[in-house]
């Protein structure tokens, strides 16, 4: 039997010598151009980073190509970012442009630094998950094709972080993104009463519902769902394969805005509902792409320098956001879950 | 190789400037039947607007309780090579630093036993090997764990510690105030048993950011968020400040006015910070990294509770330990984590994350259990409702 | 008169510069046995640190379901004259405006049949006649309601409309943008039946403030908060602005800098307001009432949901109708209130306030019932959780 | 039988002629001195208001005395304020000082306008209620004696509104006050199992508990209270006299700060827990009086001009509030009720 519990490969063994030597000694950085950073050490050493896009779902052939470039330009030292970009770690400034040229030749753009739109954090979608309300990689590709210029430039007012999750489990943790694209189910699950008791524990199943919509049905040795309490989160499906949440006729995409992670200036924020419904329209989800693009460009046109989406909306107010964006404000936008009260306007202060 | 099916919908996604995952699937499909069937099944999903995977499935590696996600096609008559299409999660190196040697080794194994498709990386941070058959799983593990250099272990899945992850950290970033990469690596090794054997009420995630910029999104995406910070004064290089001004950088508009506590001022010559009122948001340091640096009394703020929406709505971690010094071997941190997990393990219901448990039982019970004193830094504001409890010893008993 | 008991604890509260309620009780006690026993029982409470009243008790006036609070002593052997000690709630005139004639009449009746003690006023707004016996209640009502001038009616208690109240309003205040006193009076008369016959799930309170200064605390203390406001531009008298500046008033520091939306500016000569960004908080108008006045397009914002903590924690009303024109006979307002109450009456559980019901069933159901469109002005921000509902007609049904 | 439903006396009949004539025509006001307002009409007419304190719990003799003064100085026209002060409505400026002199002679102070501490909104307490955890009028008297100078002057940074409620029903609606004094019970109610079923409905009783601490006890035809879930709100007592909440050894006073009603500048705010426990110490509650006084004076010394308590704390932060006030921060300050999550610090931003 193989050894177990050996732990991950030691990162230290993978650091380029310049990073080892200047570990903890970096003094400042500059963005030389889109996708290219230089970090300067107290010792004067300079590390150049070239950030390149990746579709995240990549073949071993892609990886090997990347490895070839890393071997060629930076002794094989590279990393991936928390948003799935590739970073080449160069000691030689002279290697930057040749590397970029090689990358571009392979169709791999360089960018994603500073006031740009970087890679979209996303999830499995139809490629590998059993609960998605939409695909992941396909929408990401379609959106990034359209927003491409914002990846390769830094002309936005601030960073813009987009994320996508294909169901309410939110594996991309999209809930704190400038713009979040979220797959949603929209109909009450149907139940396979015949098989349910064979594969699922009824108490666990009833307990899994956030709104207590599931009641035991002892006669059928199954459960019933109180339709008017169900908000289609799909958690019952996660717990029990005899509850079917997927509904291609109604599954859809929703858009959320104004979230943020960093503590810089205003603290972290949840994204909030902007568009409750856009149709699932493969292969290019044109409605979703357009909605995201409009939001990006509305923000870009109106935000002051340095204002993230959340900060811009804070300043102008949500009512102005809906007015400017032309988005419809519906009953879905009004919270009715457990913390709803804290979102209600308990003041006469508002804008017209 | 069987003749590949037509995939007009997916083909459309090979157009456009952004690198295409479809192209990647096709590259793998050229040499691999599973990848070919994945392409076919995905095209079907694009037609049907739904996934074609069955619910769950349990598969694994000897000695491990997680690390592999079982996946079975519901259209395997049409696509027999994805009848099984499990993913293997390999624990990434801390900070996602690689030498190409390490990556190439994995590719070679995956070429032999898998679809040739991967995610670099999964949202939790793992190397995701996307699609293999049940019979290959053990072999894959045996081979990757036996690499002479840079051997890999499995990542987490199920009700256990999930693969911790870290930002780029001090190896690459001047803002790192803790050794985020080392902490991540050290904790991962320390808690191997928790990572590999699902024995807890539910999953628990750790993410480590070197500073409050939180480049691994720890506050939103992990139960235990560790973020570097400092306690003393921001260091100002006034020369460098003046250099920014001389270059035409709008210090007043882009820095001073945006300070959340309005504790800065700039008279055109000197920048002044009223440090006791600074909340260490990083903004001024971010914008003027040549002139401003965090102080020297460094450590971490630890926040607990971050997670996705189900059941009670998404949560962001909240401050539990405002400041902890973090030097190897990180004993205080490890003891703290053990206390948190012990309490959660004892009291948590099935599928209840630690933050949800704290909400259910109240911070007072949690703080007693982990032996921490309540302090105002834990809250944005004290309670507004009058429904608070007294411990029996605090009242006069008959 | 029996010999009064010694009350050393209460006597201490006759000292000091603030007018003393103990002195008042003693003044009444000098002529009234109930007041005397109240004093004695209260001294006992001061010794025992607890109230000496029994739980509840039902008493009333013919034709009314409320308006009297029954109260019985649990130490009536010691204090027989407070064995019954009920309070009678009289509906105050709107805005608490009185002519002495009206007050004197009430005093005279209360001298005959009551303890001689009152609250001017109760927290809801009523004249509280504090302490009488069961047998006098009807007589008291008969007499006060038969005054030739300024006759009084009972106020509310129990599960009904509670006595509405209003701020000083246009009779005395330059800020009044609705006729708060008239609206209060008119509604009180319109809804006499709801006020006097408890037929609802629980109490419901209305308070009317002439402007967003909310001098009757309507947002916190009433289910239905009606606050005057305006929609057009603030009127600026620049001469008067300059006069303020000339007097040394710090317009920048005390007004412009404190504007919550930062939509004002002052160049030392002219004050400018970016009206579309003004949220009509009143601050600038309050501080410079000689120079600034609300616009002419006036009406009210209606907020629903204010109440005390039990059961779900205290609530403040929230915006339901951002703007409603309010001119006599206030038809739109009355129709709106009827719709709100009808829905609440049909759906509310026992002891569930209307705001609690809206929280339980969701704004979406409430808005449909009262036929209002959702608008962003109702919320501080849209929902952050993805748990939202679709109406059946909005999805594709099989 | 008497007529019913005649409604309240018509306020219009009680308005002084100057108010009728200038109804809706007031142009501006000034505070001439503490307790004295002048309202100036578009017509030039001037209405003088003299605001005088009242203990609210007053005898008919007090009322008659006040009426005598109103008859003497303002043709019998007067009003009460929403905080139980008396307002004399004068047309003659010359009557102001004689009226004040007469009031003072009777021990009735004039003040409560502008940046002052006006009358304390309060409730019944031991005088007339069955659920109080403390007295109302007694504490109010003790506190106002101590804060007297702030009623008769206007030297504070802004308005200061204090309110008191003697139990969690909060009849004073103290929950949005600059400083709130709140009577609290602190022990689990005891149950009179013998009588409970005779006087109370068990389902209503169990439903009355905000924390679901009450369970039916069918054996005893009564209920049990799960002690660790009970936070002593007393609602079960309101529903059922066989549940006893009053406990003189433990009933106490708590202090809350930073609430606000008006929409001026920052919108309305809830008061938040400052001091969870002060002993019930009649007749003068010295600990409570001192605590309130300290809070007032701390705020007065530190707030900027125009800053209400809430605005001051907003600016300095709650952590600094606890530091400056020297008040202990306890586990009671940390919310654990339904909206607790929204009060937790989900950011690394805080002050030391
Ligand atoms: C490489 C990466 C860390 C990693 O371990 O992989 C990284 C690297 C840097 N981040 Fe970051 N951040 C990275 C993800 C993040 C995230 C996480 C996320 O987006 O999911 C955040 C939080 C985002 C949010 O708030 O929603 C993040 C918020 C920041 C901020 C704060 C931005 C703000 O003002 O809100 C800074 C400071 C700044 O840029 O001024 C920052 C600054 C930086 C610096 C300048 C730090 C340094 O000196 O090295 C690095 C280059 C930034 C740039 O791209 O311009 N980094 N950074 C991640 C790159 C992702 C990518 O491929 O694009
Ligand atoms: C692969 C991955 C998405 C990806 O494409 O990157 C993923 C995929 C799945 N997640 Fe996840 N989660 C992944 C990161 C996340 C994250 C993000 C993170 O870790 O930073 C979250 C949000 C943060 C959090 O943990 O709350 C996340 C929140 C969930 C949840 C909701 C948990 C909750 O408490 O609300 C579920 C549901 C569950 O556990 O039953 C879930 C469940 C799942 C399952 C196992 C589906 C299921 O119901 O059993 C998915 C398997 C898909 C598949 O077939 O491969 N996944 N999941 C990520 C793991 C890769 C890795 O190991 O690196
Ligand atoms: C007299 C008065 C206090 C005072 O000294 O001024 C009062 C006294 C009582 N209130 Fe109140 N409430 C009084 C105004 C209020 C207010 C303030 C307001 O109306 O502006 C509130 C808070 C606002 C609100 O309505 O939520 C208030 C919230 C309560 C509650 C809690 C209701 C809730 O939904 O949380 C109760 C409990 C109940 O109704 O069972 C209550 C119950 C009571 C009872 C009837 C006690 C009981 O449990 O049965 C008290 C009778 C005392 C007595 O013996 O006289 N009283 N009560 C006020 C009515 C006088 C008047 O008619 O003018
Ligand atoms: C008489 C009264 C109305 C009534 O119908 O009885 C009243 C009368 C006035 N209020 Fe008020 N307010 C009265 C209770 C309130 C309340 C309610 C309360 O305290 O329970 C509030 C909300 C308090 C809060 O926010 O917590 C209130 C918040 C205001 C404000 C906003 C203050 C702020 O900046 O937050 C103003 C504007 C100002 O003073 O600048 C205001 C302004 C005024 C003006 C100037 C309006 C006017 O031009 O006539 C009046 C004289 C104010 C003064 O005392 O300096 N009035 N005022 C109430 C007097 C109570 C008392 O006896 O002291
Ligand atoms: S978000 Fe949902 S559908 Fe998408 S990968 Fe995660 S669990 Fe699967
Ligand atoms: S989908 Fe969600 S809300 Fe609907 S029944 Fe299932 S668990 Fe409950
Ligand atoms: S979190 Fe801070 S230390 Fe880590 S990479 Fe981001 S900026 Fe650098
Ligand atoms: S770190 Fe943030 S709070 Fe501190 S001085 Fe800089 S901008 Fe202000
Ligand atoms: S609420 Fe407005 S209109 Fe009414 S008295 Fe107060 S300031 Fe005047
Ligand atoms: S009313 Fe308030 S928001 Fe409007 S301009 Fe004046 S201060 Fe600003
Ligand atoms: S607050 Fe409580 S004790 Fe005081 S009067 Fe109201 S119900 Fe009675
Ligand atoms: S006092 Fe309140 S919390 Fe305790 S049992 Fe009674 S109702 Fe429940």
Image: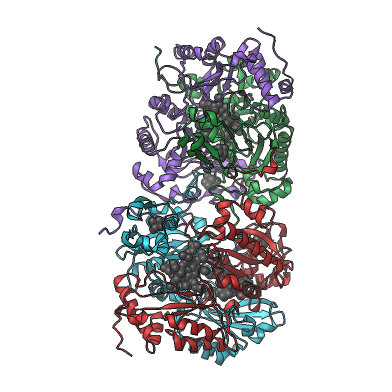
Chain colours: A green, B purple, C red, D cyan
Q: Nearer the viewer, residue C178 or C359?
A: C359
Left/right of residue D189 with respect to residue C254 in the rendered view: left
Residue D207 % position (x, y) = 45, 55
Is residue D38 something one can see in this rendering? yes
Left/right of residue B37 with respect to residue B373 in the rendered view: right
Quarter in which the C terminus of chain B is drawn? bottom left
Residue B9 % position (x, y) = 73, 22
Identify the residue at image location x=59%, y=51%.
Answer: C362
Residue B137 % position (x, y) = 49, 15
Quarter in which the N terminus of chain B is drawn? top right
Left/right of residue A329 with respect to residue B268 in the rendered view: right
Depicted A84 relative to depicted C212: above or below? above
Is residue B308 something one can see in this rendering? no
Q: Residue furthest front?
A: A219
Q: Residue furthest left?
A: B398
Q: Residue furthest top?
A: B1
Residue A146 % position (x, y) = 73, 31
Depicted C230 relative to depicted C356: above or below? below
Depicted A200 relative to depicted D7: above or below? above
The part of the image, by quadrant, that contains residue A174 is: top right
The part of the image, by quadrant, that contains residue A242 is: top right
Q: Nearer the viewer, residue A326 or B228?
A: A326
């Amino acid at each position: 039997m193989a050894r177990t519990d050996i732990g991950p490969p030691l990162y230290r063994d993978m650091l380029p010598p310049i990073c080892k030597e200047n570990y903890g000694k970096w003094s400042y950085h500059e963005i030389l151009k889109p996708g290219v950073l230089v970090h300067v050490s107290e010792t004067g050493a300079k590390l150049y980073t070239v950030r390149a896009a990746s579709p995240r779902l990549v073949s071993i052939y892609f990886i090997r190509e990347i490895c070839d470039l890393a071997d060629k330009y930076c002794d094989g030292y590279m990393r991936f970012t928390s948003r799935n970009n590739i970073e080449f770690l160069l000691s030689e400034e002279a290697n930057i442009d040749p590397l970029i040229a090689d990358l571009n030749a392979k169709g791999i753009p360089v960018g994603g630094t500073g006031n740009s739109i970087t890679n979209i954090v996303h999830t499995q979608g139809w490629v590998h998950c059993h609960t998605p309300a939409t695909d992941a990689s396909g929408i990401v590709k379609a959106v990034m094709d359209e927003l491409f210029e914002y990846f390769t430039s830094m002309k936005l007012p601030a960073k813009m972080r987009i994320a996508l999750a294909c169901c309410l489990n939110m594996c991309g943790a999209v809930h704190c993104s400038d713009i979040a694209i979220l797959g949603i189910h929209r109909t009450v699950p149907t139940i396979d009463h015949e098989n349910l008791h064979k594969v699922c524990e009824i108490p666990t199943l009833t307990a899994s519902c956030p709104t207590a919509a599931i009641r035991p049905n002892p006669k059928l040795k199954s459960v019933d769902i109180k339709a008017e309490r169900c908000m289609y989160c799909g958690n019952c499906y996660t717990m029990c394969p005899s509850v079917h949440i997927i509904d291609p006729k109604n599954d859809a995409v929703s858009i959320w805005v104004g979230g943020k992670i960093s503590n810089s200036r205003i603290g972290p924020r949840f994204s909030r509902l902007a568009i409750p419904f856009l149709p699932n329209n493969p292969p290019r989800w044109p409605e979703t792409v357009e909605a995201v693009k409009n939001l990006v460009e509305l923000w870009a046109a109106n935000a002051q320098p340095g204002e993230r989406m959340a900060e811009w909306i804070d300043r102008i107010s949500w009512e102005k956001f809906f007015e400017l964006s032309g988005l419809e404000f519906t009953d879905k936008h009004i919270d009715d879950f457990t913390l709803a009260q804290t979102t209600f306007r308990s003041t006469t202060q508002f804008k017209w | 190789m069987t003749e590949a099916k037509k995939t007009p919908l997916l083909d459309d996604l090979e157009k456009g400037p952004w690198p295409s995952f479809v192209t990647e699937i096709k590259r793998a499909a050229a040499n691999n039947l599973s990848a070919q069937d994945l392409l076919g099944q995905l095209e079907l999903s694009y037609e049907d607007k739904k996934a074609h995977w069955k619910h769950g499935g349990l598969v694994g590696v000897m000695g491990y309780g997680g690390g592999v996600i079982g996946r079975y096609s519901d259209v395997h008559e049409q696509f027999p090579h994805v009848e099984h299409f499990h993913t293997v999660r390999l624990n990434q190196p801390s900070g996602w630093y690689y030498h190409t040697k390490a990556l190439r080794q994995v590719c070679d194994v995956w070429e032999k036993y898998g679809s040739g498709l991967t995610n670099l990386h999964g949202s939790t941070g793992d190397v995701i090997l996307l699609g293999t058959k049940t019979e290959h799983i053990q072999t894959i593990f045996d081979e990757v764990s036996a690499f002479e250099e840079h051997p890999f272990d499995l990542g987490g899945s199920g009700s256990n510690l999930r693969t911790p992850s870290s930002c780029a950290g001090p190896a690459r970033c001047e803002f790192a105030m803790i050794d985020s990469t080392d902490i991540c690596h050290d904790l991962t090794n320390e808690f191997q048993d928790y990572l590999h054997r699902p024995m807890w009420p539910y999953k628990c995630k750790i993410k480590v950011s070197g500073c409050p910029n939180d480049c691994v999104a720890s506050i939103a995406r992990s139960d235990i968020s560790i973020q570097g910070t400092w306690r003393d004064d921001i260091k100002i290089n006034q020369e460098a400040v003046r250099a920014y001004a001389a270059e035409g950088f709008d210090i007043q508009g882009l820095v001073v006015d945006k300070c959340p506590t309005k504790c800065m001022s700039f008279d055109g010559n000197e920048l002044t910070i009223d440090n006791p009122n600074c909340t260490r948001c990083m903004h001024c340091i971010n914008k003027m990294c040549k002139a401003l640096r965090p102080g020297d009394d460094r450590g971490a703020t630890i926040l607990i509770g971050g997670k996705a929406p189900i059941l009670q709505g998404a949560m962001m971690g909240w401050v539990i330990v405002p400041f902890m010094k973090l030097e190897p071997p990180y004993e205080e941190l490890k003891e703290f984590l053990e206390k948190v997990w012990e309490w959660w393990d004892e009291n948590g219901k099935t599928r209840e994350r630690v933050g949800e448990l704290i909400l259910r039982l109240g911070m007072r019970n949690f703080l007693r259990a982990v032996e921490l004193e309540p302090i105002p830094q834990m809250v944005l504001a004290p309670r507004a409702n009058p429904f608070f409890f007294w411990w029996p010893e605090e009242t006069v008993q008959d």
